[in-house]
């Protein structure tokens, strides 16, 4: 339990609550000035030149657009500048960021660069982190995207703290959050390793089988290598139907569908945030029907590896035309086919046969010509049971580690809030 200040008073400010008796408060706009980014248009973007910082780059994303124009110095950003994404996603791209890239960059609109501090910049950053949750609640927007105007942000009151105390709070949070972030990074590395193991379990089982003593043969496919001697090799189009059912244009406008888009499937094959839409309100790409036992595989943006198995829990399922919907024939078990399609070898083959730079895609014809392989039905069942058991164990470990990460993040947030609102006294730490 960390110590508190000797005396407190009510700040009269919702997000601050009680503050140390010797603190006061004032609007944020009196502590710095806001410089909004330049309104670059897509026509202004180039393939090289000076990087343009957009919302997606605030979290370290290195997919930059560039400019060859000479921009006013007020739009220049350098390493260490304090930026604020005022239009972005809650919990990710909205809020304060200390820019860590070396070299000159240009600032795009929807991001403020704070200039001319009348306080310690590091303390100001941590105080902004502390107030961001409150700002997000007040901000305009729907679903995950929110925005706040400069006027609204400037009116938010922050604590007024002696400069020596500001430095002490900033140093404390730098030190403590570094420790927490190190622990989180270690746990995230554990999850990455478990995900690699998950993929390896699937790949080995569906390419080598479960019996290590079985004779092997050369598959004749460079990217596949050796497989058990008795397994059958064929093209996907001879083992399954691809995109065989779609909604007609004259479908009843009131038909209610469960809709899956590319962004609703993660790299582990989990489906989340399913949309319930009427045909009349669904996007034009909501056309492909996926029945029980289907595998849906992303044919656009193939680097996402969005591949999922459709069990019996979803009815009236329609997926985006960005997916190939694959229904297995009688001589192959649907779940086994799904695991083959999730194997590293098959995924790599899909990526290798995709075309396009920004959003690589594979057409259904090329997909159908890719090779798949299978043992008899009895052995397929054994492989499915083995993979299911192993994945259940791995996913349980991942869930436990993720729970620990979530608790560490909650602790980090609470620690920042406690320090910048004066709920704990860190001057002597």
Image: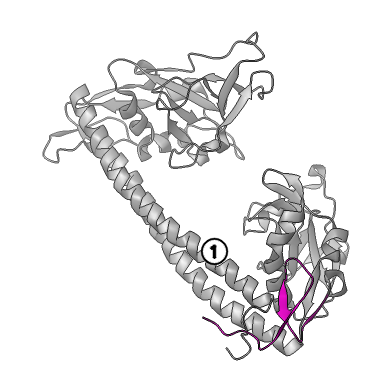
Asked whether 12 falls inside the magenta stretch, the response is yes
Front residue of 71 and 283 = 283
Q: x%, y% of residue 105?
A: 75, 62
User: Label 1: few (<14), some or many (≥20) within 10 Å?
Assistant: few
In magenta segment, residue 21: yes
Q: Percent position (x, y) of residue 152?
A: 85, 59
Residue that protrudes farthest toward the top in the picture: 250
Q: Residue at x 59, y 67 (%)?
A: 413
Observer-nearest residue: 269 or 364?
Answer: 269
**Is 25 located above or below residue 240 in the figure?**
below
Is residue 163 something that shows in the picture? yes
Task: Residue at 78% x, 73% y: name it.
Answer: 158
Residue 54 seen in the figure:
no
Is 143 above or below relative to 429?
above
Residue that badge 1 annotates: 410
Quadrant location, the C terminus:
bottom right
Q: Is residue 326 above or below residue 180?
A: above
Number of numbered discs overlaid on the protein picture: 1
Magenta stretch: give its range.
Answer: 1-25
Percent across and percent down for residue 191 are 40, 56
Q: Which quadrant holds residue 349?
A: top left
Left or right: residue 306 versus residue 221 is right
Left or right of 144: which side holds 35? right
Identify the element where label 1 is drawn. helix
Determine whether 215 is above or below 187 in the image. above
In this rendering, position of residue 407 left or right of residue 284: left
Query: Along the line of sight, which residue is nearer the eye, 195 or 143?
Result: 143
């Amino acid at each position: 339990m960390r110590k508190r200040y000797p005396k407190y008073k009510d700040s009269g400010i919702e997000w601050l609550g009680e503050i140390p008796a010797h603190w006061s408060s004032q609007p944020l706009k009196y502590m710095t000035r806001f410089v909004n980014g330049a309104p670059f248009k897509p026509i202004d973007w180039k393939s090289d030149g000076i990087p343009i910082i957009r919302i997606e780059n605030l979290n370290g994303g290195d997919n930059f657009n560039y400019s060859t124009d000479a921009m006013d110095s007020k739009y220049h950003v350098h390493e260490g500048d304090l930026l604020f994404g005022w239009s972005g996603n809650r919990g990710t791209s909205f809020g304060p960021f200390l820019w860590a890239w070396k070299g000159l960059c240009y600032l795009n609109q929807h991001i403020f660069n704070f200039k001319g501090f009348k306080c310690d910049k590091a303390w100001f950053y941590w105080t902004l982190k502390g107030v961001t949750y409150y700002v997000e609640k007040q901000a305009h927007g729907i679903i995950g995207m929110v925005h706040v105007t400069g006027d609204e942000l400037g009116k938010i009151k922050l604590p007024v703290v002696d400069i020596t105390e500001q430095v002490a709070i900033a140093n404390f949070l730098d030190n403590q959050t570094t420790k927490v972030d190190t622990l989180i990074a270690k746990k995230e590395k554990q999850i990455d390793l478990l995900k690699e193991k998950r993929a390896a379990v699937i790949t080995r089982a569906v390419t080598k089988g479960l019996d290590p003593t079985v004779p092997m043969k050369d598959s004749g496919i460079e990217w596949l290598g050796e497989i058990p001697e008795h397994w059958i090799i064929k093209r996907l189009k001879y083992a399954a139907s691809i995109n065989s059912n779609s909604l007609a244009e004259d479908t009843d406008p009131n038909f209610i569908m469960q809709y899956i888009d590319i962004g609703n499937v993660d790299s582990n094959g989990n489906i989340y945030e399913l949309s319930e839409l009427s045909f009349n309100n669904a996007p034009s790409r909501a056309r492909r029907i996926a029945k029980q036992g289907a595998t849906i595989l992303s044919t656009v943006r193939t680097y996402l590896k969005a591949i999922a198995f459709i069990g019996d829990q979803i009815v009236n399922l329609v997926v985006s035309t960005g997916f190939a919907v694959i229904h297995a024939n009688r001589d192959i078990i649907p779940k086994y086919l799904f695991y083959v399609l999730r194997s590293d070898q098959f995924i790599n083959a899909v990526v290798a046969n995709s075309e396009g730079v920004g959003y690589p895609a594979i057409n259904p014809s090329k997909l159908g010509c890719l090779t798949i392989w299978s043992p008899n039905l009895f052995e397929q069942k054994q492989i499915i049971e083995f993979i299911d058991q192993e994945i259940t164990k791995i996913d349980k470990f991942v869930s436990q580690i993720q729970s620990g990460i979530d608790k560490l993040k909650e602790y980090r947030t609470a620690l920042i809030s406690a320090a910048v609102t004066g709920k704990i006294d860190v001057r002597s730490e």
